[in-house]
Amino acid sequence: MDNNADPAPPAAPAGRPESELRALLDAAVDAVIVIDHAGRISTFNRAAERLFGYRAAEIVGQQVNVLMPEPYRSAHDGYVQSYIRTGEARIIGIGREVVAQRRDGTEFPASLSVGEVSGSQPPRFIGFIHDITSRKAGIDALRRERDRAQSYLDLAQVMLLALDLTGRIAMINRKGCEIVGYTETELLGRDWIEWCVPEARRDAARAGLQSFIAGTSAQPDDAEATVLTRDGASKLIAWHATLVRDELGNIVGTLSSGEDVTERRRAEQALVHSESLLRSAQAIAKLGNYEVYVPTGPAFWSQEMYRILGLNPKQGPVPIDVFTADVVHPDDRDRLARELQRAFNESGRLDLEFRIVRPDGTSREVHSRAQFQPSADGESTVITGTLHDITDRKLAEAEVRQGQERLTHVGRLATMGEMATGLAHEINQPLTAIATYAQAAVRMIDSPGGTETTELREPLVQITNQALRAGEVIRRLRAFVKNRATRTETVDLNRLIEDLRVLAEPDTRVNDVRLSIDLTPELPAVSADPVQIQQVLLNLIRNAIDATLEAPAAPREILVQSTGVADGVEVAVVDRAGGIAPEIAANLFNPFYTTKAAGTGLGLAISRSIIRAHRGKLGHRPTPGGGTTFYFTLPPLPGA
Amino acid sequence: MKEKPATVFVVDDDDAVRTSLRLLLKSVGLPVETFASAQEFLDGFDAERAGCLVLDIRMPGMSGLELQQRLNEIHAIVPIVFITGHGDVPMAVEAMQHGAVDFIQKPFRDQDLIDRINQALEKDRDNRAGLKERDAIRRRMQQLTPREREVLDLVTQGKANKVIAGDLNVSQRTVEIHRARVMEKMGASSLAHLVRMVIEAGRAS
């Protein structure tokens, strides 16, 4: 800083009267200061006095840098010297913003333009200073406003994209950058379509943009369009676009907001897909579902509900009281009403099979399960449930049941066939006795000496007894082989076994096998179809006979036993024959598996299905000391 | 004769059949004894008693066939009429092969049964008569000298006196003398008669 030069008296401008110049300076709005080459102030106008708070009288002759705060103050002398020496202007003729300092030390922003006073030697400089405090504040406010707007843009969870008329990116917000995977810098000025639209769609997109700008279409593009990201992925964007115009109303570009709807669309599609799956599943399963608010409130029925009930979906769900009164089969209405009442009042659940009648008069078997819960507002009850059309299942079940019964009957006939020899014998015995008694009686009558009628009494009584005996065998046989529906009753197994003796014994007798029966008294009663249980027992006895015949050295004994066991009553058929080989045991219950020359292979399979239908089990174990014991258990009557 | 009259022995496990048979046979004047099992019959069996057996082919315990087998084992000659069921033809055939007189299927006409029983009783009489005849022949044969026995064997083989003389290394005249003695001791009226007696004696039991 060269501050040692003496202040020179300000030179009067040439060619102008001093007073005119003075008036000019004082009238100027801007502060005007003239300094000499040493930086001394020679002129300080009114505006300068107002601006800096100095009086001209006290400031003239002082260094101009008192009007500057540090560090400008120290740097100033160097500027002037440097200019004088090199002629290189830092500020002269250029003008700049500077910070100035008032007399009271406060600072303010100012614009400064400096000119060299021509013709003066040594050189003098004139400066025009304008307080730009208010302008600066405005600019700052604008900048803040812009920053805030930018942050709004950046905060927005939608992509904001401004394009110029050629499709170049004029602005893109942070979300936009995020979506396409580029930085703002990378994108600004780039052709949006070139960069971010999939190649296949670029022509269409460009045409769309052009027609939008030309005002011939509402949107520059499809409302939803795919965007290509930096890593090559596709994103689905929902666009809204508007045209941008300048102050004169000329279109200068477009502004679009775009929302990344990739996930939402995917979720929507998944939802649509899953709803369609659900619909198909319901149709396939013939299972409808419903949600009904009772007494009032919304009701929802799935499509399948209408299909099952034969109703028109357009008419909407039928209210529950109408449903009970009109849709349900008349015979089942009371039952359903009772169950509904119970669900409302106590159980909170419905699990009921009933029939419904379609408008065309056909009836269907349905199974409904539902939960009853108070609604969120406590005003009503929400019934959420399913309605399952089980007609086909019921029919199938009935067919299976009939098939099972037919098979069971066939099995009985087969067993009977195997027992035929013994049974024929059993009937032949009383017939033989009858014929013989009758012929003896005739001979007695015809004898030369004649016969007392009292002597005929005995043969006649015997004839009666034997006829009844044969009749009893036939009656049991008929009862056994008759084709009949399953009929369950309370059965005393001990009595059943005793009754069976008439059918079983002939078979053992003709095969020279001893049948003994060992019953545990006072066994609990069971619920069973007696004929089917007899069938099982006869089948097991037949098998035991066959096993015994195949083992000539084995004791020719079969024991039928009844015992109480933990899970009910067990009936066992014990033989003393050769036992069962493991490879046979594995196939024992397989239908059509037989080791007998004339066997059907159905006996055990049918027996097991009978016992299973009675909720019992059929099995076998070795007889201690050799042979096999086949047994079945039946559960006791509930409460027995 | 000290012998009891020929008896019909009925063995059947069925009370009614057994009792009705007893009544029927008694009504035609046949002595009847009934047994509920084969074992019961066997326990009281007396081979000397004349008669026949009416036997149920199927019985628990010892069956009719098994009883027949036991009787054959002890060379009992009692004729057997089997009573069979409808399905028992194979068993009946087996019984016939083992010497049963006949079989009859239940139920039967009384006359058919009675005919078979009479047939069986007749056979028993024949058997017993044959048995006596055989005993007599054997006794007579035991009276022959060893040389006479040799001549008997060769004569009944159909050899001429000349051949026999050669075989025994004696004269033909000597053979003729032995032969005449044999005919006399055996009470044979002709060579054919002699041969029949030898065959009869050679029979088992």
Image: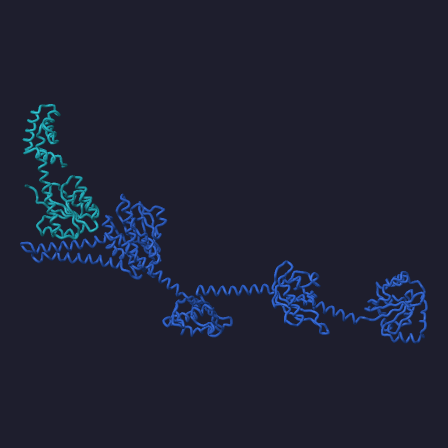
> Chain A colour?
blue
Q: Position of residue A634 (x, y in %)?
A: 33, 57
Q: Is residue A519 above or below residue A210?
A: above
Q: Is residue A426 left or right of residue A323?
A: left
Q: Position of residue B73 (x, y in %)?
A: 18, 39
Q: Is residue A620 above or below residue A79?
A: above
Q: Which residue is rendered at x = 11% and y = 28% of the image?
A: B150
Q: Nearer the viewer, residue A429 or A1?
A: A429
Q: Nearer the viewer, residue B157 or A469?
A: B157
Q: Nearer the viewer, residue A179 or A189?
A: A189
Q: Is residue A338 above or below residue A619?
A: below
Q: Position of residue B129 (x, y in %)?
A: 8, 40
Q: Position of residue A214 (x, y in %)?
A: 67, 71
Q: Is residue A14 left or right of residue A71?
A: right
Specify the chain shown as cyan.
B
User: What is the image's colouring?
Assistant: by chain
Name the image quarter holding the N terminus of chain A.
Answer: bottom right
Q: Is residue A419 left or right of residue A638?
A: left
Q: Nearer the viewer, residue A233 or A151?
A: A233
Name the image quarter holding the C terminus of chain A.
Answer: bottom left
Count of labels shown? 0
